[in-house]
Image (cartoon, grey):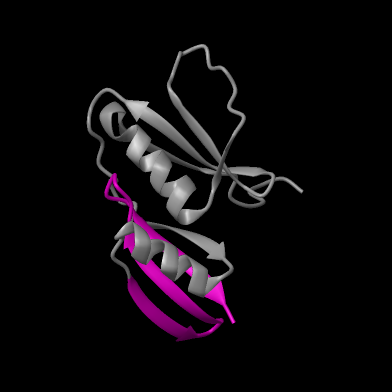
């Protein structure tokens, strides 16, 4: 069937001087893992971050600061709420908690080092 079948990945651009902090946040705090990234003819610098076997986030270093435009947040389906809260607390990352009933889940809302909102969803 032709047409959109799902989201492939999110590309987050950050100033080059902030790129390592953003990578650290998504790998060491959120739990994505760095994986293979193709070589681009443009010579762009960055990382591909994986959830399982899929590269779900592409990080790109930019020479100038970017804004998120209309992007409000990125949401990830997660497991292990107590461990994630402990990791965020240990890293000093502030977050807000919400509990919703449909679908039943706990949501953590935080902001990455580039200023992008992040939502972590833990379904019950």
Give the residue displayed 41% in from the left and 30% down from the top.
60
* Left or right side of 48 for 114: left
Residue 94 % position (x, y): 28, 65
Majority secondary structure in the magenta region: strand
Give the residue displayed 53% in from the left and 17% down from the top.
40
The mark tally for this picture is 0
Closest to the observer, 30 or 115: 30
* Left or right side of 25 for 66: left
Residue 36 % position (x, y): 62, 29
Would you identify the image quadrant in which residue 62 lies?
A: top left
Give the residue displayed 56% in from the left and 81% down from the top.
103
In the rendered view, would you say 66 is above or below 27? above
Q: Which residues are magenta?
A: 96-124
Residue found farthest to the front: 90
Residue 96 % position (x, y): 32, 73
Q: In the image, is residue 118 part of the stretch drawn in magenta?
A: yes
Residue 37 % position (x, y): 58, 27
Q: Quadrant of the C terminus?
A: bottom right
Residue found farthest to the right: 1
Would you identify the image quadrant in which residue 55 lies?
A: top right
Closest to the observer, 88 or 60: 88
Give the residue displayed 56% in from the left and 17% down from the top.
39
Q: In the image, is residue 24 part of the stretch drawn in magenta?
A: no
């Amino acid at each position: 069937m032709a047409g959109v079948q799902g989201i492939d990945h999110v590309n987050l651009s950050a100033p080059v001087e902030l790129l390592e902090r953003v990578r650290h946040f998504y790998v060491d705090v959120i739990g994505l893992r760095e994986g293979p990234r193709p070589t681009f003819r443009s010579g762009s610098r960055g990382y591909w971050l994986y959830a399982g076997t899929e590269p779900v986030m592409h990080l790109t270093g930019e020479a100038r600061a970017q804004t998120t435009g209309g992007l409000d947040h990125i949401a990830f389906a997660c497991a292990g709420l107590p461990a994630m809260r402990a990791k965020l607390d240990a890293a000093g990352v502030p977050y807000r908690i919400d509990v919703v009933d449909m679908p039943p889940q706990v949501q953590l809302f935080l902001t990455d080092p580039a200023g992008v909102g992040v939502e972590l969803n833990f379904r019950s």
